[in-house]
């Protein structure tokens, strides 16, 4: 869609003006000042060998209409008309420099005479349904620009059918309650998806109006709307029965009451995010599990009051769960993971990072029950050992991403089994796994799966890793990023050799300054390295 671009700003002190390339090229090669003849000749030349005569005529008409739209767009932006004329009419920079204001006015008037009824033509030749379909591909900014072109386009651009999906994240500092109320009145039942992520000025009053007027909403993102309380969820429960996705992340005022009313009024809910909602407890999670059996995604990062009882209830009543994120739910134990594995066979994403009470029992039961698992994040689970990951590698062959950061008990044996049993592995984090050596990296780097699929490898704070590991990774042709912070045995020469074989790789490393030698006076107190640097 060419005509959705912003008008170029004509700079007074410059002979050049910047015009969006599609608009500039279209005018230069196709319309060229006052006729569509050259455009039609080019079009007929390109498809003259086509067998369908009607097809040729149809394409000509459609492309001509597109040209009409482009000209109509330019002609209605009177503020920038001379800047456009300057680019359209001149073949090169020299001509543009010599073009006078009177010449530009003359060219503009010539265009105006030729295309004086273009706007009427575009609105007459295309039915409203087709025009609305064209406008439906534009974003919010482009729709607002088109609404300023003409009265006819204002009606089309502001039609509710074009506002089915709205994302206001880029305007989060400007969006306040009246904006949401106006959008609600404009869109009505057409609105299906609304993102208010980061709009901290939004409160319960405007959301109540939204819920009443946009009852067909299916996807609502309120992440970071800190003024939202349980009252908003009560309004959604009463008026929005079709709601399927709800993001309440970082809405710190949300409590158990919200989940209870959502369970009563939104039975079609499939995705919910309650991350960092500190007031939600096991009671709210249990009510949600009983009322929303279609739930597929449950994200509760940082919810310290979500415990084994809540997760077990979710697993028993929501058997279609595919995504579970319990990052930072530090009270979770093996019992909860066992219930998830036994009752949710479709589980493919599981985050248990920060659940330090888990043991190898959790990994073994996941290996036995969850063969669809593709992403496993267990950073900070310090009790996991090689035994659990070996069982996982033998059964979960679809694993693509694994975060094993601070699993301090694993050794090279884990890498050997992952290299053999997980052929799709793309991203692997081994940061702070201090027992990993060059031998484990050798098995990983030389395996056929790593050579084809491995793209990200994180080895921060692995003190036993040397330049030999980088030599083993040369065969990983798709490796895009490697993290080597605080790997003290890695040298600049080793990184240089790796980059010679993989020129597009991003290497993130840090080389600490050399520790200064001790002072001559032995009686003087010695400082640590950090204090010396400071």
Image (cartoon, rainbow, N blue to C red):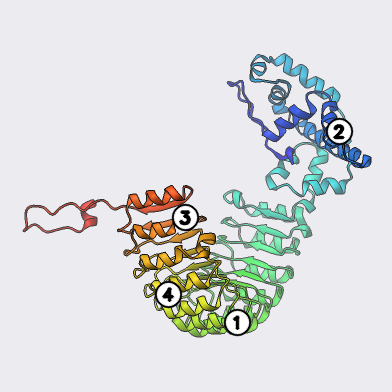
| Of labels 2 and 4, the one closer to you | 2
Q: Nearer the viewer, residue 352 or 513?
A: 513
Q: Which mark is residue 481?
A: 3
Circle 4 is placed at which residue position?
Answer: 381
Q: In which image quadrant can residue 530 be found? A: bottom left
Residue 357 appears in view: no
Query: From what the image shows, is residue 215 above or below residue 265?
Result: above
Q: Secondary structure at mark 3?
A: strand
Q: Which mark is residue 44?
A: 2
Q: Residue at x 43, y 58 (%)?
A: 473
Q: Nearer the viewer, residue 175 or 323?
A: 323
Judged left or right of residue 399, residue 24 is right
The CA span between labels 2 and 4 is: 67 Å
Q: Position of residue 443 (x, y in %)?
A: 43, 67
Q: Are marks 2 and 4 in contact (CB under 8 Å)?
A: no
Q: Are marks 4 and 1 in contact (CB under 8 Å)?
A: no
Q: Residue at x 39, y 75 (%)?
A: 382
The CA span between labels 2 and 1 is: 63 Å
Mark 1 surroundings within 10 Å by alpha-carbon count, few (fewer than 14), some (14 through 19), many (20 or more): many
Circle 1 is placed at which residue position?
Answer: 315
Mark 4 surroundings within 10 Å by alpha-carbon count, few (fewer than 14), some (14 through 19), many (20 or more): many
| Of labels 2 and 1, the one closer to you | 2
| Of labels 1 and 3, the one closer to you | 3
**Looking at the image, is mark 4 or mark 1 earlier in the sequence?**
1
Q: Nearer the viewer, residue 285 or 328?
A: 328
Query: From what the image shows, is residue 258 above or below residue 514?
Result: below
Instruction: Report the label total.
Output: 4
The CA span between labels 2 and 3 is: 49 Å
**Looking at the image, is mark 2 or mark 4 earlier in the sequence?**
2
């Amino acid at each position: 869609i060419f005509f959705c671009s912003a008008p170029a700003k004509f700079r007074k002190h410059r002979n050049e003006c910047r015009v969006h390339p599609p608009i500039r090229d279209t005018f230069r090669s196709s319309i060229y000042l006052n006729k569509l003849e050259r455009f039609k000749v080019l079009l007929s030349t390109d498809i003259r060998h086509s067998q369908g005569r009607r097809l040729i005529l149809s394409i000509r008409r459609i492309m001509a209409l597109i040209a009409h739209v482009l000209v109509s767009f330019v002609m209605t932006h009177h503020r920038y008309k001379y800047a456009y004329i300057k680019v359209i009419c001149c073949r090169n920079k020299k001509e543009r420099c010599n073009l006078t204001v009177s010449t530009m006015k003359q060219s503009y008037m010539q265009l105006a005479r030729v295309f004086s009824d273009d706007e009427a033509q575009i609105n007459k030749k295309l039915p409203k349904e087709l025009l609305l379909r064209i406008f439906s591909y534009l974003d919010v900014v482009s729709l607002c620009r088109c609404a300023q072109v003409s009265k006819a386009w204002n009606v089309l651009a502001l039609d509710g059918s074009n506002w089915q999906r709205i994302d206001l994240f880029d305007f989060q500092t400007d969006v306040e309650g009246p904006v949401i109320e106006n959008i609600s009145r404009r869109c009505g039942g057409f609105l299906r998806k609304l993102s208010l992520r980061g709009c901290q000025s939004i409160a319960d009053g405007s959301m109540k109006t939204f819920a009443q007027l946009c009852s067909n909403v299916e996807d609502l993102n309120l992440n970071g709307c800190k003024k939202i309380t349980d009252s908003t969820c009560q309004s959604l429960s009463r008026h929005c029965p079709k709601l399927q996705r709800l993001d309440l992340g970082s809405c710190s005022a949300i409590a158990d009451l919200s989940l209870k009313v959502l369970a009563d009024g939104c039975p079609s809910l499939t995705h919910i995010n309650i991350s960092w909602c500190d007031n939600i407890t096991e009671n709210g999670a249990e009510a949600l599990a009983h009322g929303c059996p279609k739930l597929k995604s449950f994200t509760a990062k940082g919810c310290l009051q979500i415990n084994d009882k809540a997760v077990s209830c979710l697993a028993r009543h929501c058997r279609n769960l595919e995504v579970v994120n319990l990052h930072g739910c530090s009270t979770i134990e093996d019992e909860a993971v066992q219930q998830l594995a036994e009752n949710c066979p479709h589980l493919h994403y599981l985050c248990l990072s920060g659940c330090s009470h888990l043991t190898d029992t959790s990994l073994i039961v996941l290996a036995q029950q969850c063969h669809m698992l593709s992403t496993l994040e267990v950073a900070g689970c310090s009790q996991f050992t090689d035994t659990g990951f070996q069982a996982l590698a033998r059964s979960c062959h679809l694993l693509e991403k694994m975060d094993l950061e601070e699993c301090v008990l694993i050794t090279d044996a884990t890498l050997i089994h992952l290299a053999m049993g997980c052929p799709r592995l793309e991203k692997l984090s081994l940061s702070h796994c201090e027992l990993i050596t060059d031998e484990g990296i050798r098995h990983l780097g030389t395996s056929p799966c790593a050579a084809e699929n491995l793209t990200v490898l994180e080895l921060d704070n692995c003190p036993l890793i040397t330049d030999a590991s980088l030599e083993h990774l040369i065969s990983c042709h798709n490796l895009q990023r490697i993290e080597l912070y605080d790997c003290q045995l890695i040298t600049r020469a080793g990184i240089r050799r790796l980059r010679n074989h993989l020129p597009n790789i991003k290497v993130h490393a840090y080389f600490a300054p050399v520790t200064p030698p001790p002072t001559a006076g032995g009686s003087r107190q010695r400082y640590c390295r950090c204090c010396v640097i400071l």
